[in-house]
Amino acid sequence: MPKPENHVPASDHRSAIVVGGGVIGTTTALALQRAGWAVTLIEAEDTPRAASWGNAGHIATEQAEPIASPAMVRGFAKRLFFRGGALALPPREIATWLPFSLRLLKAARPARYERAHEALAALLAQAMPAWQRHVAALGAPDLLRAHGHVVLWETPESAARGLANWQAADTGTAHFRSLTEAELQDWRARICAPIAGGIRFEGSGQIADPTRLAETTSARFVDDGGTRIVARVASVGDGEARLTDNRRLTADQIVVTAGVASAALLRPFGLKAPIIAERGYHLQTGPDVDWPADLPPVVFEDRSMIVTRFAGGLRAASIVEFARAQANPDPAKWNRLRQHIAALGLPIGEDAKPWMGARPTLPDYLPAIGRVPGAKGVSYAFGHNHLGLTLAPITGELVAAMLAGKSPPFPTSPFELQRFR
Ligand SMILES: Cc1cc2nc3c(=O)[nH]c(=O)nc-3n(C[C@H](O)[C@H](O)[C@H](O)COP(=O)(O)OP(=O)(O)OC[C@H]3O[C@@H](n4cnc5c(N)ncnc54)[C@H](O)[C@@H]3O)c2cc1C
């Protein structure tokens, strides 16, 4: 049967439409393109500024334990925003966060947590090698800085507790050592608050700059023949994407990578994705900031805040706010960041630019990667929560393998949405 006129694009290649141009969508589009697919990427924003741009830039290979864990449940109350922590459950958003939190509690039960841990650890072990392949393919190896990261504590008690926690944790392919006295002195010279202890991770890293990552990825995709359309997808069918302006585009495969918006696009297929917008906040300076360009990301663990030096400036990020993605940002969250910044004496002033965006998070803190059952031409990759940047290239590779009918190097069934039946 002849393809409709708007089947994209007209060529001998198999065609795919990727819906959503965040870091998961763009890396997936590139991986498919490298595998020989003719790819159209549909992104709602001309210059996307969602979580993929606003994140902390940390390649977090050390976070092999899913956040939905017995330990997280035990520490829940202490982490609440009104008690000085980073976890915000706004009362007016209770209809959103209460059902999610109940599912999270279930997912944190030991047996389910252990299964999720095994699945995440296997995926995360591939994250850094996949990043290395990705930046090599982009022709921009300097976008990845595999120089580890630092964790600092401000009191002897938190240093002892924090160190013990990391010693007991599964840190995946990353390793750490205590900071030397000279390294601690360097940090003390830079930070106003007392620094009681710290560790240096190796095997983790950062991306050099989120803006350059997005621009380089987009340019490579288009240069290699990809089509980028700025439009919002209203609905997805088997091999079809309908846009809000009523245009219909068809392809052999549709891949939904629309972050928190993915669940609504998949609902008509009867797939349940109990996703929440786990909103984070950041403040960022311009590029001329008094902070060495070669310092790795630093986590102030007592404050649940990470500070990353990008080419474009110094960024302080924190806050986990369970809410609807479209709810207004809460200025109290930026004020909390400002208090931390002042207490630490960081060179992030009043002119720093505020940002808020949503981590796409499922209750078991595993991503959703799979094919839509019963549909020949629809698959999905979203829900990467705190690890979307870290896991983007390996996710793209997995989707490309899945659509080519190849076996992945480790089991991917734990990531299928059918787990929420
Ligand atoms: C403060 C903060 C710090 C973080 N730090 C880190 C970190 O250091 N390391 C790490 O690994 N991860 C981190 N994350 C998490 C990471 O940023 C996310 O997991 C990741 O960006 C998710 O990527 P995504 O492409 O799935 O979603 P998004 O970034 O949300 O992108 C989805 C895209 O889809 C588009 N879209 C949505 N609906 C439609 C539609 N209907 N039609 C067309 N387009 C559509 C949107 O415009 C958007 O551009 C952080 C997140 C936050 C908020």
Image: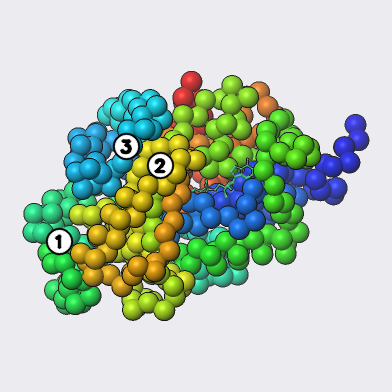
Q: Is residue 320 visible?
A: yes
Q: Position of residue 15 (x, y in %)?
A: 76, 44
Task: Name the secondary structure under disc 3.
Answer: loop
Task: Specify whether 37 is left or right of 333.
Answer: right
Q: Residues within 10 Å of mark 1 (few under 14, many from 20)?
A: some
Distance between the alpha carbons at the discs numbered 1 and 2: 27 Å
Give the residue type at disc 2.
Answer: Glu
Give the residue type at disc 1.
Answer: Glu
Q: Tell us which disc is closer to us: 2 or 3.
A: 3
Q: Is residue 168 above or below residue 59?
A: above
Is the CB–ligand 1 distance for label 2 below 8 Å?
yes
Task: Name the secondary structure under disc 1.
Answer: loop
Give the residue type at disc 3.
Answer: Leu
Circle 2 residue? 278
Circle 3 residue? 89
Identify which residue, 136 or 411, lies in the foreground.
136
Q: Residues within 10 Å of mark 2 (few under 14, many from 20)?
A: many
Q: Which residue corresponds to the image point at 55% horizontal and 38% vertical from the top-left?
A: 261
Q: Quadrant of the N terminus?
A: top right
* Nearest to N terminus: mark 1 or mark 2: 1
Task: Name the secondary structure under disc 2.
Answer: strand
Q: Quadrant of residue 178?
A: bottom left
* Nearest to N terminus: mark 2 or mark 3: 3
Identify which residue, 160 or 268, lies in the foreground.
268
Type of colouring: rainbow
Q: Tell us which disc is closer to us: 3 or 1.
A: 3
Q: Can residue 386 be seen in this view?
A: no
Q: Which residue corresponds to the image point at 63% horizontal and 24% vertical from the top-left?
A: 268
Circle 1 residue? 154
Dots 2 and 3: beta carbons under 8 Å? no
Task: Specify whether 159 is left or right of 126.
Answer: left
